């Protein structure tokens, strides 16, 4: 078990340097705290929303009063009777968002037909609609008490139904944070190369796989702790976990393993410590952007989306989001899961091949 | 929590689709990326049984290494006997470390090969690695581990059992005078102590051949001397190949010395043999009064080179007779205060052979 001996050594090197370890484990904490305070839904003020009731039926009036009772919303009174009034308010800045209850709303509810709602908002504040839509949807569903087909339209466009941003954010941040781990993983190897220690180990009978596993295993506790921090702090900041936490944890763990392997590959290829710490950023930031860490990749050009889909990160985010906030099971994310596992295996095989080549340059 | 988040109620929209569908083009992109990331070449070298060779521990056959256009090692032929301490002496950049790195299977030769105890470095690298111990030029120890842990790491990679490892480590730590500090993290050690640990890390698995690459680089003269004393203790037990650019080190330690410059081994032999080899030129230094122009002219007429500065005469020729020169000077009226024939050093050998100074 040569790899075990190497990994024991690396574990000691890593964990006997409290400052470096502090940075390594402090990073996820700092990330998730800053981002969830900045974008989390819990600490924000209620959304001030105008309501236009064109239907003027009993049902629509009851719906409005239902909206008024929701703490997350602050319905501007009085309720507008025509859209032009609300539009004017929106244009002059008196309102940032309003909800239009169209004619025929009550009728449609009675007949259990599709109900159309429209949200108009100030373009300068797109986040507002993302926050308002789920609330309105929730109220509508609660009000009707039965699963009626419900369409909420943003002006002319169908609204993308989003969860609260924190639910979107936490899995994204977790994957991004694990991607950042790439910069640290290769570090020990590169330092060892600079100091000749790696050469010493290479003059022993240790095989390439001993090196790759020996240098990655010590980071496994770091991944586990990081994922726990992301999810734990996420819950404290308002993340609603519906699905199987263990499955979500496993998905994030596997993408963490992929990141370890990528870090190891960069550590193998890097000629200096500077290269090893700087090079990953060239990939990490663009990859995080196109992989949906912070925003949806739906609207991106097909080439970009193709790249994002071919890489494992987007799959990890989508699958963990689906499991965490919509409670889907393994069956539903099986494709993503297998894709991730496949990538992890491929990355480690590539790592071993590249290391093998680097052993006799 | 909003009721809207319960599964099944949310429909339509992009976020409603869980996961990402794996389209055929996704797989295609993945394959392209994988192919770009690494060339899939796995080759397993054929292993031939080791030839149980004569009394040679290391044998190089036209060993050559070329980096781009720089010939770092130029088809060297070396035969090092079992139990011998052989020093490669040469300035920085002579190709010494490159040679060692090829012999340790860290670098692939551009041409030629070498046999280590009969194992070919190209065909049986892992066999070679089992029987060698290397102390690289950089101290190459694990800074946050203590001596025991450093020794144990190397020992266990070599598959030594815990009991034997403990005994050997204890012996080695004692030999190198490190027992007292054995439990301290080695980052707190002095340069000399780190070097000593580095050397015994190359010995902990009882290798048959020990490579010491510049074992005293960067040490002050006192610490260097101490390391020499320790290395001497392993002389005769192991075959040792040492590289150095300190001629005193080669002179003090080595059974045989190879003088290396610009990738070639220019001269080979014991220290004495090398010195004798350049003895076709002798130098005598004379401090005397009354070295008149007449005396100087007379001496220049008899010997090949005669230089005079401030009452010092330096005579160089193929053959010098001490008594004859002193008598002749006396008879010419000069008064000799002191005189000696200069013994050649390895520095002189190096200068004569390569036309360069060893020290920068």
Image (tube, coloured by chain):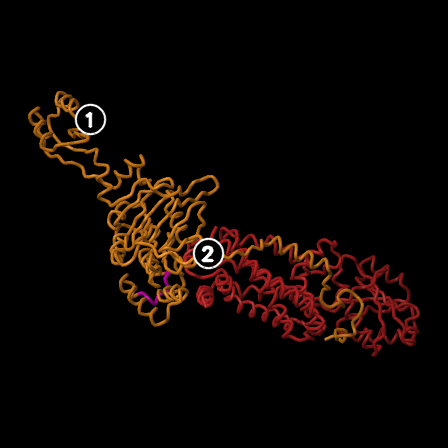
Specify whether B357 is left or right of A339: left
Q: Which chain is red?
A: A
Tag of residue A191: 2
Residue B166 place in picture, x, y as percent = 33, 70
Specify whether A92 is left or right of B302: right
Instruction: Determine the residue positioned at 56% across, 70% down.
Output: A224
Question: Callout 2: helix, strand or loop?
Answer: helix
Question: Callout 1: helix, strand or loop?
Answer: loop
Query: Can residue B100 be seen in the rendering of this structure?
Result: yes
Instruction: Determine the residue positioned at 23% across, 40% down.
Output: B275
Specify whether B108 is left or right of A244: left
Tag of residue B304: 1
Q: Which chain is orange?
A: B
In this rendering, the answer to whether A19 lies above or below B263 is: below
Residue A298 place in picture, x, y as percent = 75, 59
Q: Which is nearer the eye, A358 or A221? A: A358
Give the residues drawn in magenta, as a range.
B181-187
Tag of residue A128: none
């Amino acid at each position: 078990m040569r790899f075990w001996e190497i990994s024991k050594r690396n574990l000691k090197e890593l964990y006997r340097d409290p400052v470096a370890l502090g940075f390594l484990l402090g990073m996820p904490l700092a990330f998730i705290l800053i981002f969830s305070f900045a974008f989390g839904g819990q600490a924000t003020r209620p959304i001030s929303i105008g309501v236009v009731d064109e239907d003027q039926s009993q049902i629509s009036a009851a719906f409005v009063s239902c909206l008024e009772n929701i703490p997350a919303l602050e319905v501007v009174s009085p309720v507008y009777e025509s859209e032009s009034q609300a539009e004017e308010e929106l244009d002059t800045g008196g309102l940032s968002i309003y909800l239009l209850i169209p004619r025929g709303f009550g009728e449609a509810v009675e007949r259990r037909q599709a109900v159309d709602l429209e949200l108009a908002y100030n373009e300068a504040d797109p986040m507002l609609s993302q926050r308002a839509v789920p609330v309105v949807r929730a109220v509508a569903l609660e009000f009707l008490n039965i699963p009626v087909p419900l369409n909420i339209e943003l002006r002319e466009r169908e609204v993308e139904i989003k969860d609260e941003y924190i639910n979107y954010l936490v899995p994204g941040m977790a994957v991004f944070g694990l991607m950042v781990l790439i910069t640290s993983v290769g570090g020990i190897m590169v330092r060892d190369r600079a100091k000749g220690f790696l050469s010493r180990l290479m003059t022993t009978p240790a095989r390439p796989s001993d090196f790759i596993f020996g240098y990655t295993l010590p980071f496994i506790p770091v991944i586990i702790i990081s994922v726990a921090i992301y999810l734990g702090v996420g819950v404290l900041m308002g993340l609603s976990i519906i699905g199987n936490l263990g499955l979500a944890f496993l998905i994030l763990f596997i993408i963490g393993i992929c990141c370890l392997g990528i870090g190891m590959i960069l550590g193998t290829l890097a000629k200096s410590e500077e290269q090893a710490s700087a090079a990953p950023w060239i990939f990490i930031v663009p990859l995080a952007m196109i992989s949906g860490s912070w925003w949806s990749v739906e609207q991106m050009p097909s080439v970009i989306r193709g790249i994002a889909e071919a890489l494992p990160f987007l799959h990890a985010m989508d699958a963990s989001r689906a499991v965490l906030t919509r409670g889907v099971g393994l069956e539903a994310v099986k494709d993503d899961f297998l894709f991730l596992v496949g990538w992890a295996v491929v990355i480690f095989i590539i790592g071993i091949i590249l290391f093998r080549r680097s052993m006799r340059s | 929590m909003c009721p809207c988040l319960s599964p099944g109620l949310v429909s339509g929209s992009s976020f409603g689709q869980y996961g990402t569908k794996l389209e055929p083009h996704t797989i295609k992109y993945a394959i392209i990326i994988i192919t770009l990331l690494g060339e899939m070449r796995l080759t397993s070298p054929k292993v031939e049984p080791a030839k149980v060779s004569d009394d040679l521990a290391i044998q190089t056959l036209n060993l050559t290494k070329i980096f781009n256009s720089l010939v770092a090692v130029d088809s060297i032929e070396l035969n090092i006997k079992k139990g011998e301490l052989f020093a490669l002496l040469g300035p920085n950049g002579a190709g010494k470390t490159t040679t060692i790195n090829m012999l340790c299977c860290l670098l692939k030769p551009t041409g030629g090969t070498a046999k280590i105890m009969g194992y070919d470095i190209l065909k049986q690298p892992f066999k070679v690695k089992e029987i060698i111990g290397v102390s690289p030029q950089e101290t190459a120890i694990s800074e946050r581990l203590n001596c025991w842990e450093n020794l144990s790491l190397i020992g266990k990679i070599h598959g030594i059992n815990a009991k034997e490892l403990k005994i050997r480590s204890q012996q080695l730590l004692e030999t190198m005078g490190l027992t007292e500090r054995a439990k301290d993290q080695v980052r707190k050690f002095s340069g000399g102590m780190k070097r000593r640990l580095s050397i015994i890390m190359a010995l902990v698995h009882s290798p048959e051949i020990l490579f010491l690459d510049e074992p005293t680089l960067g040490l002050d003269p006192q610490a260097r001397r101490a390391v020499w004393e320790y290395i001497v203790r392993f002389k005769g037990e192991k075959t040792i190949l040492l590289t150095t650019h300190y001629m005193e080190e080669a002179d003090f330690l080595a059974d045989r010395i190879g003088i290396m410059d610009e990738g070639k081994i220019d001269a080979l032999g014991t220290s004495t043999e090398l010195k004798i080899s350049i003895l076709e030129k002798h130098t005598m230094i004379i401090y005397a009064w009354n070295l008149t122009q007449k005396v100087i002219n007379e001496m220049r007429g008899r010997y090949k080179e005669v230089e005079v500065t401030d009452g010092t005469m330096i005579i160089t020729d193929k053959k010098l007779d001490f008594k004859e020169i002193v008598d002749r000077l006396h008879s010419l009226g000069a008064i000799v205060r002191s005189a000696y024939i200069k013994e050649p050093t390895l520095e002189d050998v190096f200068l004569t052979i390569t036309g360069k100074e060893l020290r920068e």
